[in-house]
Amino acid sequence: MNNNKVSDEKENENEYLLSYNAHLEKELRNLERKKQHVEGEKMQLERDLDNLRNAIDRLREPPLVGAVVIKRVRGESGRYDEDKYLVMSSVGMILCVNINPELKDIKLESGAYVLLNQRTFAIMEVLSLTREEVLSAADKLAHLYQVFDQL
């Protein structure tokens, strides 16, 4: 009877351990699923954070001023390869400006519409506007100025 009692206790203990082991395995699978979910969420949040940081960086960039290229000018060395341009800004100032190094391969012709960095006055973008589009916009602005003057 002692042997039966000992064997019953061992059997109960084995059943308990098997049951507990199954419970731990199930808990482990649940935790692994949660971990994968959290890692996916973390990656999404990191992408969102990068997008927000990029948006903030874009907001911190200085505003751009419109200008028209008058002509390419020679640099101090007397060569044209230094990429300086004479432009007339949208506020009427004539400036000698550099071009953004990313645009060095672009050779601008007289009359090209560009955007200047308001702080450095470097050419940052080349616009593909036609003369008609610019004149149409200027006409609309002139009309707005007349309306404002009447107020």
Image (cartoon, rainbow, N blue to C red):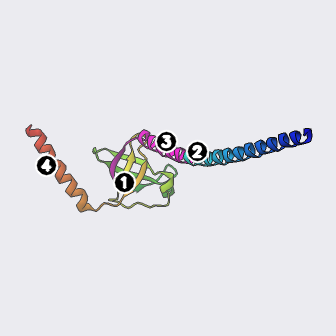
Question: Are dots 1 and 3 in contact, CB under 8 Å?
Answer: no
Label 2: few (<14), some (14–19) or many (≥20) C-alpha neighbours in 10 Å: few
Question: What is the distance, in whole Å, between disc 3 and disc 4 at their CAs?
Answer: 39 Å
Sequence-earlier tag: 1 or 3: 3
Q: Which mark is residue 114?
A: 1
Label 1: few (<14), some (14–19) or many (≥20) C-alpha neighbours in 10 Å: many
Sequence-earlier tag: 2 or 4: 2
Give the residue number, with chain letter if any, for mark 2: 38
Q: Residue at image x 42%, y 48%?
A: 97
User: 40 or 136, which lies in front?
Assistant: 40
Discs 1/2, front: 2
Give the residue number, with chain letter if any, for mark 3: 53
Local SS, label 4: helix
Residue 50 screen position, x and y as percent: 52, 45
Give the residue number, with chain letter if any, for mark 4: 143
Residue 37 screen position, x and y as percent: 58, 48
- In the image, 91: left or right of 10? left
Discs 1/4, front: 4
Q: Residue at image x 13%, y 49%?
A: 143
Local SS, label 1: strand
Q: Which residues are magenta?
A: 43-69
> In the orientation shown, which residue stands out farthest toward the left?
150
Question: What is the distance, in whole Å, between disc 1 and disc 4 at their CAs?
Answer: 24 Å
Query: Which quadrant is home to the C terminus?
Result: top left
Instruction: Kindly identify the amino acid type of the residue bearing the numbered disc 3.
Output: Arg
Instruction: Kindly identify the amino acid type of the residue bearing the numbered disc 2.
Output: Val
Sequence-earlier tag: 3 or 4: 3
Secondary structure, magenta segment, majority class: helix
How many numbered discs? 4
Sequence-earlier tag: 1 or 2: 2
